[in-house]
Amino acid sequence: MQLENKINIIKHTNSFCPVCLAFIEAKITENEDKVYLESYCPQHGSFRRQHKWDDLYYYNTMNELTKHNIKRYPTGLFIDTNFNCNQNCNFCFAEANERDERAPAISEILSKAENFKGSYIYLAGGEPTLREDLPEIIRKLKQRKFIVILATNGKKLVDEGYVKELKKAGLDIVQLQFDTLDDAQYEFIRNERLAGLKLKVIANLKKAGIFVYLWVPLIKGLNDDQIKGIIEFSARNSSVIKIVFFAPMWLEGRLREHPSITAGEIIGAICKEYGIGKDEFADYVLFDYYLSQLYQLLTGLPFFKFQPCTLSYLFLYLNKSVLPFSRVVDLKRVNTHLAAVYQLLSQRGLANKFRNLFKLHAAFFIKEFLLNKQARPLTFRLLRSLLASVIFKSQLTFKDSFSFQVRVEELFNRQNTDFDMLKHCNLYAYFEDELMPFCQREIVRKKASLCQ
């Protein structure tokens, strides 16, 4: 790290010009523990923006864990099934009902998925439920052993019969647009009062046995007061809601100028509500990371890329209370032992491996997880899932009825794209015939439309 004009240069990267969307040189800098993206366009001059991870602590955490990604591959493929929608949202990034493009045939959708090495296919749009052949698309993807996620506003899922049809086709997960619990806020964001509809949809999905991810885009001063309410709601419904994504409303939508909240501010709000230190968020990211390393070591299968744009944390719902995971186990000590176990198992010599494993670490893990009444149910679920994955050489899937993840995710936009970090993206999409990170695809697509 060198010093230039009293600003620390962390590294050099590339970005987009926020004006013409040209590919330009950029650098990541730090000043007083804040991280910035500085770039220069020959046509439009210099730009300085806050980095997506503007807190140096989080930036360093996320950047460090990408070092093992080189032999990994992205987990998800985002496929546009259509370009029309049954909503008219003020903040739509897909430009639904505006794009003069033909919806792809089933054969084209399957062709895109054919050579993808990841496990998850995201069916999106537009609004994918407007396709009459959606159940058939799902069936054919399931025949190819993919986990299928439907990204939807949910309006058609109020029909219980239709939900059953999707379940029969093999749908695994619905990623549901879920902005708020307040109808007045829905009216501003989506031009409709949708709170009751969303609750009905979740009830239908629970009844059908389809898991739910909530996608919660936040706007400062509008719906950022909903964070705790949505976490508490998700806790009460954690048998069906397994992940809650909180994300700043993307600046690549119809309205690009609006009060913007940062990922760091979202994390700060969650930490304040539940008495979590910001290091505890990072501790859980490390915990997740070490488990992925052990999974790869035990199965021989390459695990998916570590996603540096998402910070995750686990909550438990026990005795009708929301309990942060780091209140149940000592994550710092757990991570120290997990790192040591990984190093130990990476060495040669089977007998010494397991003798030292039990000698140095078994007592700690037994006390922390098996003798801990709050952690024990989660531990048994995790061990069962891991054992099944090792035996059958299959993707690790973990399901229970009392835990859920909160993920804070900020999508790159034309103002803050860091290509050095973007290359570690876990969600890819096609632009024409080229496969690229999803955020990059959306910006490139908009650049192409500007040139027409």
Image: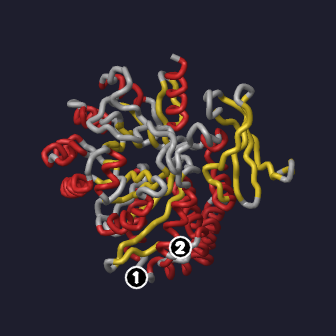
In percent of width and height, residue 119 lies at 42, 42
Mark 1 belongs to which amino acid?
A: Lys
Mark 2 belongs to which amino acid?
A: Ile
Give the residue at x 58% y 50%: 308
Give the residue at x 56% y 40%: 413
* Image height of 436 relative to 303, above or below: above
Q: Which residue lies under the disc numbered 2?
A: 276
Q: Can residue 260 be seen in this view?
A: yes
In percent of width and height, residue 312 lies at 50, 60
Earlier sequence position, callout 2 versus callout 1? 2
Q: Is mark 1 on a helix, strand or loop?
A: loop
* Image height of 240 relative to 259, above or below: below
Res 104 → quadrant: top left
Q: How crowded is mark 1: few (under 14 residues within 10 Å), some or many (20 or more)?
A: few
In percent of width and height, residue 143 lies at 30, 36
Q: Which residue lies under the disc numbered 1?
A: 373
Q: Is residue 423 visible?
A: no
